[in-house]
Amino acid sequence: MNQEAGDQIRKRKRRNKRQKTDTSSTKQSANTTATVAAQHTVKNPSASAVSKSSSKPLTYLEKMKAKLAGGHFRMINEKLYTCSGDEALSYFKEDPSLFSMYHTGYQEQMSRWPEQPVNIIMKWLKDHSSSLVVADFGCGDARLSKGVKNKVFSIDLVSNDPSVIACDMSNTPLESSSIDVAVFCLSLMGTNFPNFIQEAHRVLKPNGWLLIAEVKSRLDPTNGGADPDRFIQAVCQLGFKSVSKDFSNKMFILLYFRKKEKNNSKKEIEWPELKPCLLAHSLGFATVKPEEISGSQPAEVQNLVQGKWMKTTNLNTIKDPLNGEKFITISEVEESGIKPFVESLSKCPKHGLHNPFKSPERYLLYGDISAKAGHMLAQPEVADFFAKLIQRVAPKSYQQAFGEVYVTGKFLENFSGDQVRFLARSFGVPGNHLGQQSHGFRWPYGPVAVITPFNFPLEIPLLQLMGALYMGNKPVLKVDSKVCIVMEQMLRLLHDCGMPLDDVDFINSDGKTMNKLLLEAKPRMTLFTGSSRVADKLADDLNGRIKLEDAGFDWKILGPDVHEVDYVSWVCDQDAYACSGQKCSAQSMLFMHENWSKTSLLRQLTDLAARRKLEDLTIGPVLTVTTEAMLGHMKKLLQIPGSKLLFGGEELENHYIPSIYGAIKPTAVFVPIEQILKAENYELVTKEIFGPFQIITEYKDNQLQLVLDALERMHAHLTAAVVSNDPLFIQEVVGKTVNGTTYAGLRARTTGAPQNHWFGPAGDPRGAGIGTPEAIKLVWSCHREVIYDVGPVPHNWQIPPST
Ligand code: SAH
């Protein structure tokens, strides 16, 4: 009868679409893992080997081995959940080494759980008599037997330990009615699991205990799992009575039964299906390995439209910026292929996917997705994955790439829980008469587009995309082809964290096709981050329905008060040359008060620039300006009277950067302030070079007005720094300038923005913002006022004369 039930279950579909539930439950930060490991060492001596190794940082090689083991673990785990016990037995008999591989991966996964079910069972046994004879069905490395005084029969498919009986647990050599406690700790894996429980029933004495610990997601009907009550009922029909159940743990549930003295039931048992628990590895979402992408193994990038990943036949290849190998293949959508994207956007009404009056549960859904995704990015292996992937496509130092991932993770954490709902907070004003109240609401635009550049492959698109989604919009996302692989992988992570597949479309195409898509799909709002040239064209094409973050000719003024020359020199070097100057916030011009020229500042800038090396990518390829263009620009500047090269001004040595990209040493050109202001020089000097290039100038006490005049004439007002601790000086400069993100004080800088502040340009009504709640609300929602006027109409009201 139960065999039949098992067979029935086997016939059903077995793919587990709830992988995401399981991943979420295996996500713990490194710190938590270490704490859990430490607790283990105290509670459970047999676990100390695992604990020790997980508390010290792994070497690169160890990490790689663990990753490989992780891959095998997933495969074996899936196999065990989708075959019967006897099939599993022959599987391991063929290759017993798979068993230890499985358990390495299993332990790795379990180390992320805040509590181990086997420890709870040990505690239960310790609280009962040590004379109870135990059978541990599916004992793994037999740690239960090692942690208690009881006589324990440990049973598993493979015996690496002499105390373990190797057999299929539906058919054990144990005598009937010989056991006091039968334990299944996360071991109901086979498709014929009812046979395992039946075998436990056979070997148990009357009144004997049956303890089952099972992964929560398998028995959570709200998440696609089986109904625990149905499962309990089936076990009872087999001849048990349910004593208690414990749902208090986050990761697993515990069920306690006792064998009935007699079992009269002859009824056929209806077992619920238990889906596989694909204890997913935290990199389960990824389809590429950053280290392995190469000319011989190119990675592939797909499009996502109407909930489906899609390839095309029009392939674009991207060259590795470090050696020119064609290392990424992108499925690009051609003009003839935009229809599904247009359709998808048009399906979204102007009132959006949600708003305060429609599907408000989606605010919470996005709070939840953000919490999960933030938690994913906090995992070392996930952060490392994205940092390395970023490095491959937008070469910058590991620290800079990691910083990008870190800030992105913090952003997601910031918008977890109810914080997305709070973004749509409304306000009310009392009306003119009873029953009238005016309410202001944040309203979505509906269909929108997000277009983002190469320099921050993860941070800019993710922050803008999430902002769009939080406010209820449906975005189509287009990321610069050179780096789009990063967001392609991030979208897969977001799907794993519960983002509905059809909330975001992702398109790869050339600019012309994207332009056509925008004209046909008519998004109600487009956010563009990138060059001013494209920004201006889009503003025209889209009739101004656009928000922009374009150029940044970012300046820094060193005030008359000189302090901390070492520190200020270092910040100047970072601002001008980190990420090879390819940040929209990079320092383009340094105004130095003459007091600073008398210090070691310029010498230190020269030395710090010389430290930068291609090997660690502290200097590297420039993706949008060629070497020739940068050196050509420098030559023109050097024709200005009084100008001189301070350092750099040469191509990098010993590099294989292809000639479509730029490769120069960190460069600074000095131009006298009076010359900068001359009409014939101003445009040239303030031309933004998106590379490791800056202008340095000097001003005297009585020349501050010249500096302010130079700033007034600039047209891109993104970041700025006033390095001074003189409040009156700061006041003077800040009061007479217009930069969206301005840092003031001794430690002021232009780059390295933490995630807790507004970032964006000022002085342009089209200016976008990024990062904070205010930025999200400004860019991604409009205002709607609803004036409630419900009455009552005054008692003696009469129609008044016309007015
Ligand atoms: N109970 C242990 C291990 C759980 S892993 C612990 O909590 O640490 C699940 C174990 O069940 C694996 O070691 C697997 O080999 C074993 N298992 C799965 N199907 C089995 C079967 N049909 N017979 C015996 N053991 C089985």
Image: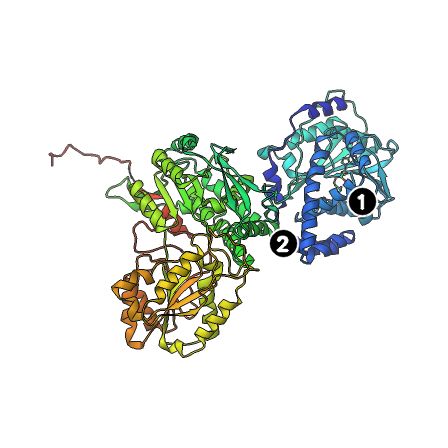
Seen in the image, is 471 located left or right of residue 406? left
Q: How many marks?
A: 2
Callout 1: SS: loop
The residue shown at (34%, 39%) is 524
Along the viewing direction, whichever of 523 and 27 lies nearer the viewer: 523
Give amino acid for label 2. Answer: Ala
Seen in the image, is 314 located left or right of residue 644? right
Return the disc, 2 or 1, that comes first in the chain's sequence.
2
Along the viewing direction, whichever of 740 and 115 lies nearer the viewer: 740
Along the viewing direction, whichever of 520 and 729 lies nearer the viewer: 520
Q: Is residue 323 visible?
A: yes
Q: Which residue is mark 1?
A: 142
Q: Which residue is mark 2?
A: 30
Q: Position of residue 601 (x, y in %)?
A: 44, 74
From the viewer's perspective, is residue 656 above or below residue 786?
below
Callout 2: SS: helix
For the residues carrying marks 2 and 1, which lies nearer the camera in this image? 2
Name the quadrant containing residue 242: top right
Q: Residues within 10 Å of mark 2 (few under 14, many from 20)?
A: some
From the viewer's perspective, is residue 311 above or below residue 405?
above
Q: Position of residue 412 (x, y in %)?
A: 50, 49
Seen in the image, is 528 located left or right of residue 300? left
